[in-house]
Image (cartoon, grey):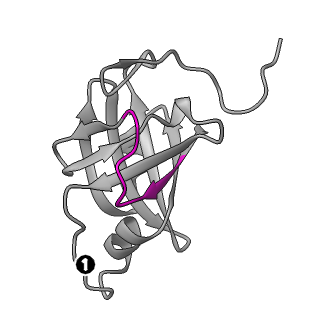
């Protein structure tokens, strides 16, 4: 099962509340704190990717959509993996794939209570339901 998590956008401008991801050498913001579930990704240095490497080029130059999945390994079977899987922080594993012309991030959470060390209780995207 897939559940919408966030939209990721690469930026070169520092953002408030960034957390460091050592594996990919980027700072990221917490999409759970943004009203439209946007995550800003700021690379330490912008990678120079040959456009012939379409998936990796799109990862660094276009937005991505992220989904929470129950089983990351099952979700990526048969997919074109661009980056990962890897553990960016204490909350679980992620992978980026190229599918239908778009970069998609799958996240398999081990905890929904934190985001890069920031306490952030999980709440679903969208309106609150009773």
Check disc 1: other Cα within 10 Å, few if <14, some if 14-19, many if 20+. some
Query: Quadrant where the C terminus lies?
Result: top right
Dominant secondary structure of the magenta stretch? loop
Magenta part of the chain: 7-17
Q: Nearer the viewer, residue 60 or 44?
A: 44
Residue 12 locus on image (x, y percent): 34, 61
**22 is within the stretch colored magenta:** no
Q: Which residue is drawn at 48% across and 31% down?
A: 70
Q: Residue at x 25, y 78 (%)?
A: 49
Q: In which quarter of the image is residue 52?
A: bottom left
Query: Quadrant where the N terminus lies?
Result: top right
**8 is within the stretch colored magenta:** yes
The image shows residue 11, relative to residue 105, as above or below, that is below
Regarding mark 1 in the picture, which secondary structure is present there?
A: loop
Farthest residue, direction bottom: 52
The image shows residue 44, relative to residue 16, as above or below, that is below
The residue indicated by pointer 1 is 49
Is residue 21 at all visible to an observer of this figure? yes
């Amino acid at each position: 099962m897939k559940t919408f998590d966030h939209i990721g956008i690469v930026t070169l401008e520092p953002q408030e509340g960034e957390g460091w991801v050592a594996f990919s050498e980027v700072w990221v913001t917490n999409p759970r704190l943004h009203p439209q579930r946007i995550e800003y990704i700021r690379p330490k240095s912008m990678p120079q990717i040959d456009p012939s490497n379409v998936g990796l080029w799109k990862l660094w130059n276009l937005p991505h959509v992220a989904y929470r999945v129950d089983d990351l390994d099952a979700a990526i079977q048969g997919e074109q993996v661009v980056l990962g899987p890897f553990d960016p922080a204490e909350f679980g594993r992620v992978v980026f794939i190229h599918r239908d012309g778009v970069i998609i991030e799958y996240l398999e959470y081990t905890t929904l209570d934190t985001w890069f060390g920031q306490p952030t209780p999980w709440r679903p995207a969208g309106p609150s339901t009773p």
